[in-house]
Image: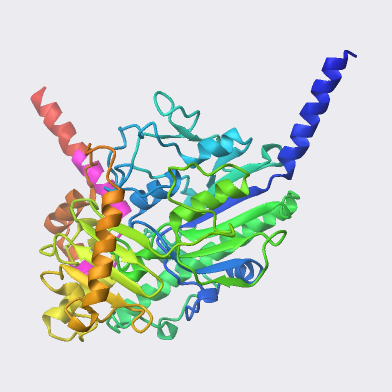
Amino acid sequence: MNKSVITGLLLLAQTAAFAQQKPNIIWLMAEDMSLDLECYGMKAVKTPVLNKMANEGVRFDHCYVTNSICSPSRSSMMVGVHQLKINAQNHRSNRDVPLDTHYKPFTSYLRQAGYTCILGNHAVMGLGRKIDVNFEHESIGEWDGKTKFGIFDKYDTFEKADQPFFAQIQLLASHRGDWWNGIRAQSAHPVNPDSVQLPAYMADHPVTRLDWAKYLDQIEYLDNEIGGIFKELADKGMADNTIVIFIGDNGRCNIRGKGYLFDPGLHIPLIVYYPKALKGGTVRNDVVCSTDITATILDFAGCKVPEYMDGQPLFSKDFKRDYVFGARDLWDEIMEKSRAVTSADWKYIRNDKPEIPYDAHQAYLEFYRPAVHIMRKLYAEGKLNEAQKPFFMPTKPAEELYDLKNDPQELHNLANNTKYAAQLNRLRAKTKAFEASNKAVSSVFHPEDPGATEVLAWVKKEKPELYQQMCDGVEIGLQTLTKAYKAKKGNKNGKKENNAE
């Protein structure tokens, strides 16, 4: 055999061996979840698999997303920079606008390093494969950012032939959906509503307790799903060389959670499991941003973290972060503009549209927040306490300041307390500085039409009994009703066309 051929084969063998030494990486992304796991101290929920991950891995207690809504948050994590910088801050917008060529999805760098990038579907009811970013993209295919916009290489399955692989696996159950009742019904041990512990800003009512119990049922379901993923890794002989990262994409979908810059909207779980290299049972209390997770994945893969990225590798010896800069902008039909800075001890929120109340009657949320409907009634009847009233006021404060050490539920706004004027001024200036350093690359604004607004109007007009059930705290099924509305609308359009003929 020719000497150069032999040398080439040896090099290929060495390259293959090196590639197999690189760790596989699985990013488990649970939808709409705050720190509501047993290992974080949440009462009434059982999460044995995630407990094991935390006991044998590293649990982060102060990880925050940059936006409390899925698509801006995911855009930030996919690129590794704040969503404002890449003009991806408005929910479900600019899906026809290419990402500025200065930036790339982080999977591009993983591919260059020899990784197979997989978009996983281990989700309830066969749903999943969610990317949900606010720039032009395709799920599968090549990426050049100009004519090719593919982010992943394949769907769902990971095999030894894919090694090293990166898999982003969606855990959909905890997202509000028509499946919540079904999952609760099939549970062998549904969470007892009498056992849940509600936060102080929520009214104690049978509907709010049941709603919270259903949410915890979903968390138990996805914990079981994660157990299945670990079993698959073991069965395929890949468990020892696979890093598993668990996060939420934003906070829980309930009062003060998803869509808001309070702690339940921005504060997410983060567990990194890799017993081969990380000391088990470690708890990190330093402040972490979701873009740091992006940088950490690249670091695990042996990739150089691009200079433009905001994130830092979490296990670097010089990792240090004092603040996370949060922002809330468009969500469906509600055009908001709020900014926040979170440190280990303090939270500052600036609301540029104080005339828009927290409870803005957004159509999507009307279908999916029983607690809002119940508490609206209690507010009108004067039955909410001082911790519960602010969410239902006709306006919100222009500025908010919270002492997180002494007031972790953010119940006491100190912005107008002169005793804290210096702290307010410092965080106000810090927020302005963050905003100035994250100016968008463009002002293009192409939002999608939110379908829930039409469906809600139709339900109010055509199905008043169902609407009344909604107002009484029943989730009447947005997805099912959307299909019914579209079918009826299609029939009407068809009749008009036939009449015209």
Res. 500 in view: yes
The answer to whether 325 appears left or right of 4 in the picture is left
Q: How many marks?
A: 0
Q: Position of residue 454 (x, y in %)?
A: 17, 49
Position of residue 254 relative to residue 22, above or below, is below
| Front-lying residue, 283 or 127 | 283
| Front-lying residue, 479 or 138 | 138
What residue is at 29 percent from the left and 45 percent from the top? 92
Q: What kind of secondary structure does the magenta stretch mostly adopt? A: helix
Q: Position of residue 8 (x, y in %)?
A: 80, 21
Q: Position of residue 425 (x, y in %)?
A: 22, 70
Position of residue 372 relative to residue 364, above or below, is below
| Front-lying residue, 186 or 306 | 306
The answer to whether 389 appears left or right of 124 in the picture is left
Q: Is residue 6 magenta?
A: no
Q: Is residue 479 magenta?
A: yes
What residue is at 71 percent from the left and 51 percent from the top? 241
Pick out the residue farthest to the top: 2
| Front-lying residue, 53 or 45 | 53
Give the position of the N terminus as an image quadrant: top right
The answer to whether 266 appears left or right of 397 in the picture is right
The answer to whether 469 appears left or right of 308 in the picture is left
Position of residue 293 relative to residue 204, above or below, is above
* Quadrant of the rendered image containing residue 200: bottom left
Give the position of the C terminus as an image quadrant: top left
Q: Which residues are magenta?
A: 468-489
Colour mapping used in the image: rainbow
What residue is at 14 percent from the left and 60 percent from the top? 353
* Quadrant of the rendered image containing residue 156: top right
What residue is at 17 percent from the left and 62 percent from the top? 361
